[in-house]
Amino acid sequence: MSETVELSDIEKKSLTEIPHPSLPEGSTIYGSTKVFPDYQAEDGETYFTLVHGIAHESSVSFVAVLQATRALRKGFETAIYFYGPGSLNCLATRGFPTTGNSAFPGEHNINNQLKTFIAEGGKVFCCRFGLSLHGAREEDLIEGVIPTHPLDVQDALIHYARKGAIINSTYQL
């Protein structure tokens, strides 16, 4: 049973001052011209992403995973390395009130996208020290995530730089 809310005259005036929505759903408000070519990987090209951002604290981590997935689909050998607080993105134990249940829409966006990325051939590395800093356990990693030694962060960067990788480094405070 729906209850009718009584509005004051000033509330009604404010509500009807500007029509809402000003455009119907499906209206185009942004152009679709792509400025740069849709580059595809050339033989042997790699794409490497470093993520030092916490899941759900901003879009930084999720967008980095989406960009890496796009690079993978363009044919790049692609890897993502989560370190520091970014390591928390790799936990399979996310959920409330139980693991796997989303307490809010999108709670498992990163989990699902990482599973897709791995299934499509991408590599995901996760720093063991980053996990330990936040009390996360290695056995709680998403299946297929490769745990790494803390000293591997720098060497992974050197490894991919020497391969000539495009390097995307994301950082969130």
Image (tube, rainbow, N blue to C red):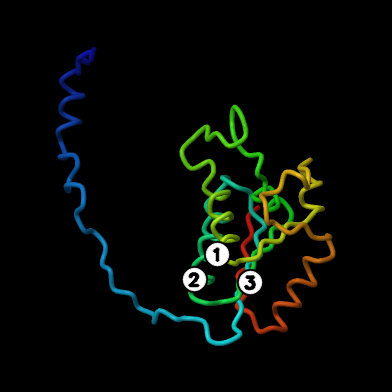
- Label for residue 73? 2
* Circle nearer the N terminus (1, 3): 3
Whole-percent x and y of residue 32? 28, 69
Q: Quadrant of residue 78?
A: bottom right
Q: Residue at x 62, y 74 (%)?
A: 167
Whole-percent x and y of residue 102? 52, 35
- Quadrant location, the N terminus: top left
Instruction: Give the residue type at disc 2.
Output: Arg
Q: Nearer the viewer, mark 3 or mark 2?
A: 2
- Label for residue 137? none
User: Dot 3 lies on which element?
Assistant: strand
Instruction: Give the residue type at disc 3.
Output: Phe
Q: Nearer the viewer, mark 2 or mark 1?
A: 1
Q: Is residue 41 above or below residue 96?
A: below
Instruction: Give the residue type at disc 1.
Output: Glu
Label 2–label 1 contact, CB within 8 A: yes
Q: Residue at x 60, y 70 (%)?
A: 168
User: Dot 2 lies on which element?
Assistant: helix
* Circle nearer the N terminus (3, 2): 3
Q: CA distance from mark 3 to mark 2?
A: 14 Å
Q: Is residue 123 left or right of residue 29?
A: right
Q: Nearer the viewer, residue 143 or 127?
A: 143
Whole-percent x and y of residue 56? 56, 45
Q: Nearer the viewer, mark 1 or mark 3?
A: 1
Q: CA distance from mark 1 to mark 3?
A: 16 Å
- Label for residue 48? 3
